[in-house]
Amino acid sequence: MCGIVGYIGKRSACDILINGLKRLEYRGYDSAGVALNYNAQLTIAKQKGKVAALEAHICNDVSHDAVEKACSGIAHTRWATHGLPTEENAHPHRDNSGRVALVHNGIIENYAALRKQLEKKGSSFSSETDTEVLAHLVGSFYSDDLLGAVSEALKMVEGTYGVAVLANDSPDEMIVARKGSPLVVGMGSDESIIASDVSAIVAHTQQVIYLQDGDVARISATGAEIYTLDQCVVDRNISSVEWEIGAVEKSGYDHFMLKEIFEQPSALENTIRGRLDKVQGTAVLSGLNLTPRDMASIKRLVIVACGTSMHAGMVSKYLFEGLADMPTSVEQAAEFRYCNPLVGADDFVVAVSQSGETADTLAAVRESIQKGALVAGLCNVVGSTIARETGRGIYLHAGPEIGVASTKAFTAQVIVLLMMALKFGRRRRLSREAGLMISREIEQIPAMIEKVLEQNEAIAKIAEKYAQVEHAFFIGRGILYPAALEGALKLKEISYIHAEGYQAAELKHGPIALLQESTPVVALLNDIPGKEKTLGNVAECRARKAPVLGIVTEGDLATAESVDDVIWVPQCSVYAAPIISVVALQLLSYHIARIRGCEIDQPRNLAKSVTVE
Ligand code: G6P
């Protein structure tokens, strides 16, 4: 949510900032801006809309000297919270004197009170944003010590921030700070690049420092000095980013989403690698850091997550209860802390989050830790807040996910949860033979996904038939119910078709009233227990003239005859079924959105990483 990038070094900053913003655009894309520090002046350019609009504006309207010669600058791509997506509200914002400019990700919760105080002292504001208040506040403290001024201002702020600040008369430094919104410092040779995530940095360096909450840092071309807000020095490790720039490029695909769908076999191989014990038939997940005593004392699993990650969590309820007899509840993270969550020492809370930054999931983590539960994070982004705060967990190793609609993260999350269920299952009730069978099945999932991907053209053809509908339902039973929810979510996210996922039998308790010829039903009919019952529900839909598109196991001709259209998926066990079905539904949504001409990688109103409540 909102992307920040900053550069200080020997090269021309503007290009580096614009290219960095393009890499971060998935975080928010309703306006963008840049501030360049050149010749004791801050040149600011902002535009409503995408980074490309900002780039054109800079080309046509901004002083060439600043664009070519400024060697430090900050930039921002916005996902609006306070104030409409307009040029005035776009970042960077300045203080009244124009000496200070800053970009900010997060929310200043007490901005209204601060704004009143500043107005009394003579500040006048040109935007509706909370961020401009922070710029004025920094300006009010600034004489010649920018680090001190930023620290003092941040002490007065309630809320969250990742922030980068420049002062016109201090060209050799940039001050950055974080609390609740990620910020990474890239350490190049004779240059530093800061950003809200590493994808804007890897083109320049793979050596990074992940700032921690409460850190404020002075960044120069030669590195970073990091302090607390009270100006005590802190030491942070330099880490090496594991992947290279190719991972955040489209590599010939039309969209990141399609690339990420097709990457799933290799991404999942990375997720699985080294984690299956093929002698004992269990999973090796050392990052969970659970002692045999912990494993024995856990009475209940509680999953907290949002969006697609919550659907992965819902799949895992069937896995943990089925394989490990482990009662599992799946909680919407946004509700968790507001409903007296009954978690304690016997509970194992697992936060599932691709980004590791989702504000509601993070808040659920903090609440659970405070209540004494064992808490683990299941994240894709290395060094993310949830991964760090839980201190135990499993990385997905699925590689960066850029498309706003989550695809490979979902399948990797389900695989990791399946491996966790296997591990608990082996401790509690599964025989070695049963464990070995499941681990063999897990190993085959990437190849099964390959087979679904081979259906790409056939799915594109089916998409043509359904692309113009206004409403759609997705139905499934048991472990395929969350897959139906995820199929519906994918379709609405990227094609803007109104889609609902339902447990197949539940459809008749109300929603069936909406079925008609123009309202298709996508039915998950994999050949696993429950299929016959879902077929009964399919008949009910067809009796109301709703066309039915079935996800059907190869060779299951009888089922194929009961529906109007078919997407074939390979034969598999109940554990793999939600994964391979969702891959088919990802492709279906992708092609429908493509045919409708939608902005697939950056759907309207959405952001990849939601760092506000
Ligand atoms: C946003 C994204 C979704 C994602 C959800 C949870 O809403 O648009 O695709 O599923 O956040 O994100 P997380 O990073 O916690 O998995």
Image: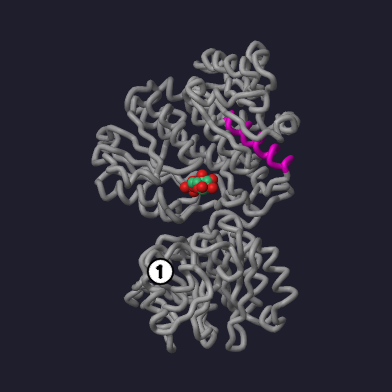
Q: Nearer the viewer, residue 543 or 109?
A: 543
> Residue 585 colored magenta?
yes
Q: Determine the main secondary structure of the stretch shown in magenta.
A: helix
Q: Nearer the viewer, residue 241 or 172?
A: 172
Kindly state the secondary structure of the residue where label 1 is placed. helix
| Vertical side of 116 occupied by 76: above or below | above
| Vertical side of 506 occupied by 30: above or below | below
Q: Is residue 31 left or right of residue 209?
A: right
Quarter of the image for residue 465 reads top right
Q: Is mark 1 within 8 Å of ligand 1?
A: no
Q: Percent from the top left, x then y, of residue 547?
A: 66, 22
Instruction: Tell me the residue at 55%/33% (across/down).
Output: 500
Q: Percent from the top left, x then y, of residue 479?
A: 48, 26
Instruction: Tell me the residue at 50%/81% (across/down).
Output: 100
Residue identifier under label 1: 111
Q: Amino acid at mark 1?
A: Tyr
> Residue 324 colored magenta?
no
Q: Please indicate, yes or no, whether residue 273 appears anywhere in the rendered image.
A: no
How many numbered tags mark residues here? 1
Q: Which residues are magenta?
A: 580-596
Q: Nearer the viewer, residue 229 or 207?
A: 229
Q: Please indicate, yes or no, whether residue 76 appears anywhere in the rendered image.
A: yes
Instruction: Tell me the residue at 70%/63% (across/down).
Output: 52
Q: Residues within 10 Å of mark 1 (few under 14, many from 20)?
A: many
Q: Nearer the viewer, residue 302 or 505?
A: 505
Quarter of the image for residue 142 reads bottom left
Q: Is residue 238 left or right of residue 22?
A: left
Q: Percent from the top left, x then y, of residue 140?
A: 41, 83
Instruction: Tell me the residue at 67%/27% (across/down).
Output: 518
